[in-house]
Image (cartoon, rainbow, N blue to C red):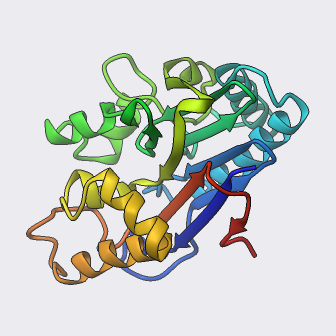
Amino acid sequence: MPEIAIAERAGVGADGHPRPTEDHVVVLDNAVLVLDGATSSDPSQPPGGWYAERLARRLADDLRTHPEADLTELLTSAIAEVTTANRLRPQQSPSSTVAAVRWLEDRVDALVLADSPVIGFGGFGVDVVSDDRLARLRRRGMLQTGADVRRRRNAHDGFWVAEADPGAAAHAVRRTWRRPDVDAVLLASDGVSIGVDQYALFDWREVLAITRADGPDAVLDAVRTAEKQDPDRERWPRPKPHDDQALVLVDFNSGVIQGLP
């Protein structure tokens, strides 16, 4: 089993007050999952973390039972099961990103749905598996209100995310690498990837180097420090002063798990 190092940190709610993280990390014998529940503006809905926790548990159970099954099919089934069990309805339910990495004897598979990227490092260089549909809509000013988000969620002119539509899984971004070619893989929620994509504090090679040298918490610290220097969110406009953060390193050079309780 590869070495796995994990760092997680709660952000704040839309009101700026502390609240439990809505990110969820699951480590299995041959896979890692990172899910980032979306903060809901509708108080009548369960929070995104509630949904992310249930979907993560269902997907993990299915991976344990079928460790070599197709990741898209597993995610489709998991969304359907959570939707049915909790009587969720499309466009009126909480949602979550999904980032999954699964390693087998001959290959490493990655799946990304919405904005929690997976980054592979190895003989192929640096391969960023990301879903930028949500970011493109934000840059174009097309997600100004909660109604905008709901209308474009899981729509062909919008973005795709785990919610109450199992068909969203078919729109995930996929990648497969030969296992001998893979040196390491990172999984991140957008509270971490923002440090690369928007703040330009470092690139992904530097994130890997920092994580290996000082642990993943050092990367989270750097992002938080930058945000604290921009308290009014003028340099980097963002919905909240601090988002939830999750960063996982899957390092194929060792066999010790770090950062787990």
Q: Choose top left, top right, bottom left or bottom right for residue 27.
A: bottom right
The vertical placement of 14 against 71, above or below, is: below
Determine the residue positioned at 61% across, 64% down. 5
User: Quick check: 3 above or below 124?
Assistant: below
Quarter-of-image position of residue 88? top right
Q: Please name whichever residue, 35 or 150, is drawn nearer the observer in this view of the structure.
A: 35
Residue 150: image location, x then y, percent: 40, 36
Looking at the image, residue 5 lies above or below residue 89: below
Left or right, residue 207 beside residue 226 = right
Residue with the most extreme left position: 235
Q: Is residue 208 visible?
A: yes
Residue lying furthest right in this view? 65
Quarter containing the C terminus? bottom right
Q: Position of residue 202 (x, y in %)?
A: 24, 61
Residue drawn at x 46%, y 39% is 120
Q: Nearer the viewer, residue 162 or 73?
A: 73
Looking at the picture, how far across and down is residue 56, in whole percent? 71, 47
User: Is residue 244 visible to the viewer in this orientation of the structure?
Assistant: no
Query: Looking at this view, is 209 or 160 the one in front?
Result: 209
The total of numbered circles placed on residues is 0
Q: Is residue 150 left or right of residue 145?
A: right
